[in-house]
Image (cartoon, rainbow, N blue to C red):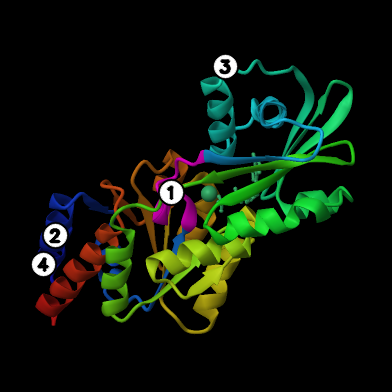
């Protein structure tokens, strides 16, 4: 391997907004067999907005949104930002909450007017013993349309569903097709529900989905693929993804990635597009050809 050809490859990548940490990463990129893509912020834009408010009987849409935004006001999660923003747009005043708690991969809880409030996925409701029966069908329907439905409960009573949608990046489908044409197995990994994940995957031509994964378990799924003998890349944008990026043979941090994600990655894609992954692999192939 000539250090010169690697330097040339790294330089060429940089011209495309692809920052490669070292020559090793550039060479590994050309040997990849599987690519795991985080959903939120990687395949999708990462800026969800509220699309549907489905109140339970006895509640209005406004009450549902007011309670949801009150519970989320202390959360850093993109889903929380979407909900608080929707309330702001409607000039809804938020209530004070106490004992706020973020429940990783499930949602949030807090005390609101002396009563516990919960907002999150079906798993959170199950954990609290709250019956979602009456709204489950509608949540499933929204999930089938690639939306993320969240249940809101006060005490044991269901107040409604708040659904958000995160638009798919305009060039995700084309970039994923390029990766598949390079002979790579493309897999989507997400903490979101199976139904939502399948709907998003279908829209971008991905047939392999690993859903409902807790943030701390993402790296273990990468490890499992490696144990099957595959050389695996992970592409992600968030703090959640740092251990998985570090575990992967090549970790790609994509666009607007957090500092933590960038530190754990071998490659940083400045342009926030999945085309950067295919470009990096193509440059690696060209570099490896020169080495031989
Ligand atoms: P992702 O892989 O998209 O980053 P997370 O692991 O952060 O997913 O969250 C998984 C699921 O947990 C979300 O799809 C949502 O249903 C629920 N959830 C997580 N955080 C929140 C929150 N702050 N408010 C409501 N629901 C949440
Ligand atoms: Mg995430």
Residue ID for mark 1 = 41
Q: Which of the two marks, 2 or 3, is nearer to us in this view?
A: 3
Q: Are marks 4 and 2 in contact (CB under 8 Å)?
A: yes
Residue ID for mark 2 = 7
Quadrant, the C terminus: bottom left
In the rendered image, residue 153, in percent from the top left (x then y), is placed at: 80, 39
Task: Identify the element where label 1 is drawn.
Answer: helix
Other-residue count near label 3 (Cα within 10 Å), few / some / many at <14 / 14–19 / ≥20: few
Q: Are marks 2 and 3 in contact (CB under 8 Å)?
A: no
Residue ID for mark 4 = 5
Other-residue count near label 1 (Cα within 10 Å), few / some / many at <14 / 14–19 / ≥20: many
Q: Which of the two marks, 1 or 3, is nearer to us in this view?
A: 3
Label 1 CB, ligand 2: below 8 Å?
yes
Task: Identify the element where label 4 is drawn.
Answer: helix
Residue drawn at x 57%, y 59% is 196
Above/below status of 181 relative to 93 = below
Q: Is residue 192 visible?
A: no
Q: Which residues are magenta?
A: 39-49
């Amino acid at each position: 391997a000539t250090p010169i050809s690697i330097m040339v490859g790294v330089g060429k990548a940089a011209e495309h907004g692809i920052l490669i940490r070292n020559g090793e990463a550039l060479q590994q990129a050309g040997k990849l067999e599987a690519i795991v893509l985080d959903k939120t912020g990687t395949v999708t834009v990462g800026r969800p907005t509220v699309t549907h408010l489905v109140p339970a009987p006895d509640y209005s849409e406004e009450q549902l949104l007011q309670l949801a935004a009150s519970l989320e006001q202390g959360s850093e999660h993109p889903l929380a930002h979407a909900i608080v923003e929707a309330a702001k747009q409607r000039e809804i005043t938020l209530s004070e909450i106490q004992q706020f708690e973020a429940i990783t991969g499930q949602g949030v809880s807090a005390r609101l007017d002396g009563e516990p409030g919960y907002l999150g996925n079906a798993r959170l409701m199950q954990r609290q013993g709250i019956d979602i029966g009456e709204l489950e069908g509608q949540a499933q329907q929204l999930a089938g349309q690639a939306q993320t439905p969240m249940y809101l409960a006060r005490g044991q009573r269901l107040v409604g569903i708040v659904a958000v949608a995160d638009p798919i990046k305009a060039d995700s489908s084309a970039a994923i097709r390029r990766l598949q044409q390079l002979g790579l197995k493309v897999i989507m990994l997400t903490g979101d529900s199976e139904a939502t994940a399948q709907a998003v995957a279908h829209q971008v031509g991905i047939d392999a989905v690993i859903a409902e994964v807790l943030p701390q378990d993402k790296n273990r799924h990468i490890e499992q693929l490696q144990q099957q003998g595959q050389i695996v890349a992970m592409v992600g944008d968030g703090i959640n993804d740092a251990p998985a990026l570090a575990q992967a043979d090549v970790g790609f941090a994509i666009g607007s990635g957090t500092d933590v994600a960038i530190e754990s990655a071998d490659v940083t894609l400045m342009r926030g597009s999945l085309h950067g992954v295919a470009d990096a692999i193509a440059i690696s192939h060209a570099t490896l050809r020169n080495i031989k």
